[in-house]
Amino acid sequence: MRLTLIHPCIGRRLGAPYIRSWQMEPLAPAVLAGLTPPEIDITFYDDRLERIPYDEPTDLVAISVETYTARRAYQIASEYRRRGVPVVMGGFHATLVPEEVQQYAETVIIGEAEEIWQDFIDDFRTGAPHPVYRAVRRPSRRGVRPDRSLFTGKRYLPVGLVEAGRGCQFTCDFCAISAYFGNTQTRRPVDEIIDEIRQIHKPLLFFVDDNIAANMDQAKPFFQALIPLKIKWVGQASINAAHDEEFLHLIRASGCQGLLIGFETLNPDNLRQMRKGFNTMNGGYGAALANLRRYGIRLYPTFVIGYDQDTEETFREVLEFSLYHQFYMVAFNHLTPFPGTPLYTRLEQEGRLRFDKWWLDPAYRYGMVPFMPQHLDPVTLQEKCVEARKAFYSLSSIVKRSLDFRVNCRNFLMGSNFFVINLLLRKEAQQRRGYPLGDEAFRGELLKVGSYHEIHV
């Protein structure tokens, strides 16, 4: 049996290369390959890096779908299905809107694949796969090992991706992660993660956990076990972790170089609306930032602008805040309602969505605001986000922040890459503008299949 795994890109402009900063190793196909019986011949194509040879012989194509890649995934599926090759899809988008995804694939995997994939493969081999397989519980993470041999020969950024835990216990109303995992987190056994890390030879590791501090009782022994490895790593955490001195000590001792933290907004009313009031606990941002700076933890804060209390003044406030604190990196993003989230449902009920399924609308481009904000024009919100990125990544800002030798440039690895990363993001601020969802070279209609049915396993 021949299996082809595909990682779709967001889209592709005619005659233009894909955006370099988006090209890290994708874990989803590697995990799927690790779950696949060894006698099956696996081929992997990353749509961001290479052209897909649709006429190459294969028996089955598997695609992991996110909302931003949905249109492109359906284009790829259509090309294979026109050639008589069946397609199975899974991932976040497939779980949040399975009825849509099943229109473009013979089979849809709903939920995490660890306890479903083998059943599907067995059914496929006997010629009787079901249209839908749904996980009825969070699977055990024990024994799951990504097969990184898929990445051999592909030109990715020099960062090794590792997953220690999956999910988050918070209930932020805009977050597709919370909707997908039901506000829960599962973690892998520490010894298995350590063994995996020993096999990765990259200068920097990225723990892709949605919130690496979600369960402190489990996270702290894990960081303790990392210390002897003498690695350098970055990850994602909620800001409440910044008030735990033991946590801060352990992450620095274990090699933490920086954290992505969702600040989202400086407005307490917005925080309450997005169900993220915990950001203001124990003295709020000021106390948290002081603690993180004491331990030399670089920050990549993300801001989400477009909630009901936001105005044009909001952009000035978050930009001044970011420049004052000299963050290593910052993301100024407009609010985006993802299907399956409480935010999407609320905006839909209020009649504020500008598109019926923005992720599929041919008129939609990356960076467009797909809803009607309360106090901002959608185009103004879109343009102000771009302006904030340009201002933060201006040459004068980059130079000034590079002089922060206590945090930003306190060691050779992160100091030497500071200019590379910031100049890349400076360039990307313009590249992302108007980026298409789906390949502009695709011709013809998306090929659909039959009706939606479901089986629980």
Image: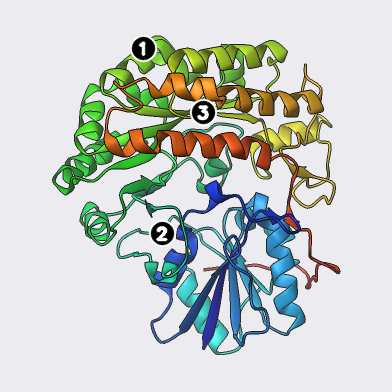
Cα distance between the residues tagged 1 and 2: 37 Å
Q: Secondary structure at mark 1?
A: helix
- Say which amino acid is labelled 2: Pro
Q: Where residue 239 sits in the image (x, y, percent)?
A: 41, 25
Residue at mark 3: 330
- Say which amino acid is labelled 3: Val
Q: Where residue 362 sits in the image (x, y, percent)?
A: 83, 51
**Quarter of the rendering containing residue 453:** bottom right
**Quarter of the rendering containing residue 294:** top left
Lower sequence index among marks 1 and 2: 2
How has the structure been colored for display? rainbow
**Quarter of the rendering containing residue 61:** bottom right
Residue at mark 1: 287
- Which is closer to the viewer, label 3 or label 1? 3
Q: Where residue 177 sits in the image (x, y, percent)?
A: 53, 43
Seen in the image, is 441 located left or right of residue 178?
right
Residue at mark 2: 139
Q: Residue at x 73, y 32 (%)?
A: 346
Q: Are the residues tagged 3 and 2 within 8 Å (C-beta)?
A: no
Mark sitting on residue 81:
none
Q: Residue at x 50, y 16 (%)?
A: 323
Residue 204 visible within the image: yes
Lower sequence index among marks 3 and 2: 2
Cα distance between the residues tagged 3 and 2: 34 Å
Cα distance between the residues tagged 3 and 1: 19 Å
Q: Where residue 395 sits in the image (x, y, percent)?
A: 54, 25
- Say which amino acid is labelled 1: Ala
Seen in the picture, residue 390 relative to 90 is either above or below; the reply is: above
Seen in the picture, residue 278 relative to 197 is either above or below; the reply is: above
Q: Residue at x 17, y 40 (%)?
A: 224
Q: Nearer the viewer, residue 107 or 34?
A: 34
Q: Secondary structure at mark 2?
A: loop
